[in-house]
Amino acid sequence: MKAFAKTAKKVARIVDPYLPQIGNFGYQVSRYELDLEYKVAINRLSGTATITAVTVTELQEFTLDLSDALTVSKVSVNGKRAARFACRNGKLRIAMTSKLATGAAFSVVVRYSGSPRPLQTLWGEVGFEELTEGALVAGQPNGAASWFPCNDHPSAKAAFRIQLSTESPYQVVASGKLVSRRARASQTVWTFEQPEPTSTYLITLQIGVYVTTRLASTPVPILAALPQRLRSAFDHDFARQPDMMELFVELFGPYPLANGYTVVVTDDPLEIPLEAQGISIFGANHCDGARTSERLIAHELAHQWFGNCVTARQWRDIWLHEGFACYAEWLWSEHSGGPSAEELATYHHQQLRMKPQDLLLTDPGPSRMFDDRVYKRGALTLHALRRQLGDEKFFALLKNWTVRYRHGTAVTDDFTGLAANYSGDSLRPLWDVWLYSTEVP
């Protein structure tokens, strides 16, 4: 076992310098199948993960990301028991009895159990979290490993099937389309299919004593799961979501998922809302009957295009998520009778000028990934681009962006390269001052 650990350590490389401990080389996952049971009262998760992948190099050993709070009892590869496996320091290390050739398809089955808990990270607690009545998963940026073995990097997208058995009083919401719900004794088994390639951090699981409802009829189905006590406030606070959906489809292109959009409101307060593939999660504090969280509702919906569908290949380019979603807030305000995008840009530009001039938008550093300046400066960059291109070309660019990189990954150079096609003049001066300089123009 010591020799195995040394070998695994020797071949370890860094996938992303912002999160050097996550991500794995040597293979590409195409599908995860999770068959799980969760006992709410005792916070006990157990089951199997079946991972289908293809090697990108010759392999005899490989790793998966998995929390140390979970215990692995059995691992098999292509139906054969693994020669050795060990789980520590957030990695499940697996050695096979024989090598797999480059380009070989293989299947890994991991049986595991434990009491899942959030990972302690630079950005606070991330991942699987108990609620007063239920649980939630807040995966960004590296929380998927808190509840299933995976290649937990945004560039590693795959399809998912999630089957969860839990006590029947609880409603379950997970990424994907609900394809089956069957009761057996005191348990209910919920099965979801997510065919669109999805980053692991965007796969979520929500368990609570919820009622479900469908919002007013729209071309894109919008569902909600929430405590009954919040229904009246929700009906007021989220009433304009169908209008947001209609606007964003017009400006950004078709909604990227076949199974629609779901909003979950937990019975507990949450510090911030959370995005997941096809789902946004809000706390009870975001549902106060006064529409005080409407900009956040717009922000999370916009992430379905920017961040969830088109995903940054490296975390350094997170402005491609947050800057775009922040600008969507301003576009919604402009459309719905609030301050215009120009007015909001002017205000936030003044605010940024008064803050430290030490943040590089295209490489903010891991500790500043979620700095509000990334959000606002990203939005301001887009507004400057909109001014230069004009509305027709700017929104044509956004639609092309969401179609060209649909369910894929991209970096800043991909966006600037695409934008060049929409301008008769060089955009380099704009990019130099907004993307590649720390001083706010």
Image (spheres, grey):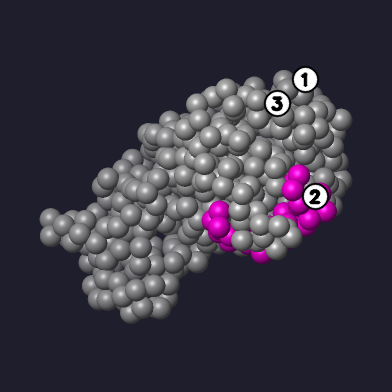
Q: Which mark is residue 390?
A: 2
Q: Amino acid at mark 1?
A: Ala
- SS category of the residue bearing label 3: helix
Q: Which residue is mark 1?
A: 290
Q: Classify residue 353 as left or right of residue 99.
A: right
Q: Is residue 417 above or below residue 394?
A: below
Q: Work out how far the residue at label 3 is from the one at label 2, CA to CA, in angstroms.
A: 21 Å
- SS category of the residue bearing label 1: loop
Mark 1, residues whose alpha carbon is within 10 Å: few (<14), some, or many (≥20)?
A: few
Mark 2, residues whose alpha carbon is within 10 Å: few (<14), some, or many (≥20)?
A: few
Query: Could you tell me which residue is drawn at 33 percent across and 54 percent down?
Result: 14
Query: Could you tell me which residue is drawn at 50 percent across and 26 percent down?
Result: 356
Q: Which mark is residue 135?
A: none
Q: Amino acid at mark 3?
A: Tyr
Q: Residue 101: where, in percent of width, then height?
A: 33, 79
Say whether disc 1 or disc 2 marks the residue closer to the N-terminus.
1
Pick the residue in front: 117 or 336: 336
Discs 1, 3 touching: Cβ within 8 Å = no
Q: Amino acid at mark 2?
A: Gly
Q: Which residue is mark 3?
A: 347
Query: Could you tell me which residue is drawn at 51 percent across and 64 percent down?
Result: 31
Q: Main secondary structure of the magenta part?
A: helix
Q: Is residue 227 above or below residue 395?
A: above
Q: Quadrant of residue 117?
A: top left
Q: Residue 77: where, in percent of width, then height?
A: 34, 69
Q: Residue 103: where, in percent of width, then height?
A: 40, 78
Which part of the image, by quadrant, shows the C terminus? Answer: top right
* Extent of the magenta region: 386-415
Mark 3, residues whose alpha carbon is within 10 Å: few (<14), some, or many (≥20)?
A: few
- SS category of the residue bearing label 2: loop
Q: Nearer the viewer, mark 1 or mark 3?
A: 3
